[in-house]
Image (spheres, rainbow, N blue to C red):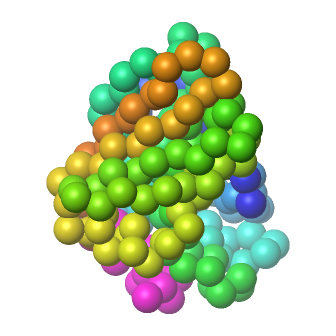
Amino acid sequence: MMIRRFAPLVLGTAALGLLLGLTLPLMAADTAPKSLGKFGEWEAFAKTGPDGKVCYAASLPKQSKNAPKTRERAYTLVSNRPSDKSHNVIGITAGFALKKGASALLQVSGNRFDLYTVDQTAWSRDDKAVVAALTKAKTATFVGYPAKGEPVADVYGLEGFGDAKAAIDKACGGK
């Protein structure tokens, strides 16, 4: 369930939905994603495919520091896959290869979450705690460590996160 590539884009509601739906292996299926709505800095989607229904909310960073020049698109997702009985899965794609063996960090208000990494993606070890923190905060900062160079920090706005999550929970039976 690794998210690997995200093509450069000019953002808009339709562009984000189309690109996420076409480029994320996590979302591979026969139908295009359907927008469930744009909520502040987040947008929610649902998609049905051979493995069942998948619902996800996504956002792009609003600020980045020390990003590599060759970076691909960075984004954060929270997803529900009822057929796998997985809900509130947090994944953050850095847009560059993360240093092998290094963890990443997500800071949300006074909370610090250690994330494990696979290729370009960092995954939460405690999705429930991360979702609870994201629901109450205004911003979150992701810090990822590339193979070479300085740590990269991305700031995500959380306006609308709770509403986007509620939309995917309603569409995919989340908690």
Q: In this view, does 134 lie to the left or right of 78?
A: left
Q: Is residue 129 left or right of residue 48?
A: left
Q: Nearer the viewer, residue 142 or 111?
A: 111
Q: Which residue is drawn at 32% across and 74% down?
A: 132
Image: 36 above or below 121: below
Q: Is residue 106 left or right of residue 82?
A: left
Q: In this view, does 120 lie to the left or right of 69?
A: right
Q: Residue at x 48, y 42 (%)?
A: 75
Q: Which of 80 and 112 is in front in this view?
A: 112
Residue 55 is at least partly visible in this image: no
Q: Which of 132 and 82 is in front in this view?
A: 132
Image: 70 above or below 41: above
Residue 82 % position (x, y): 63, 84
Quadrant in the picture for the C terminus? bottom left
* Prevailing secondary structure class for the magenta stretch in the rendered image: helix
Q: Tell me if residue 135 is in the magenta stretch.
A: no
Instruction: Please tell me in which quadrant of the rendered image residue 57 appears.
Output: bottom left
Residue 147 % position (x, y): 67, 25
Q: Give the range drawn in magenta.
A: 163-175
Name, please, the residue furthest toward the front. Answer: 101
Q: Residue at x 40, y 67 (%)?
A: 130
Q: Tell me if residue 165 is in the magenta stretch.
A: yes
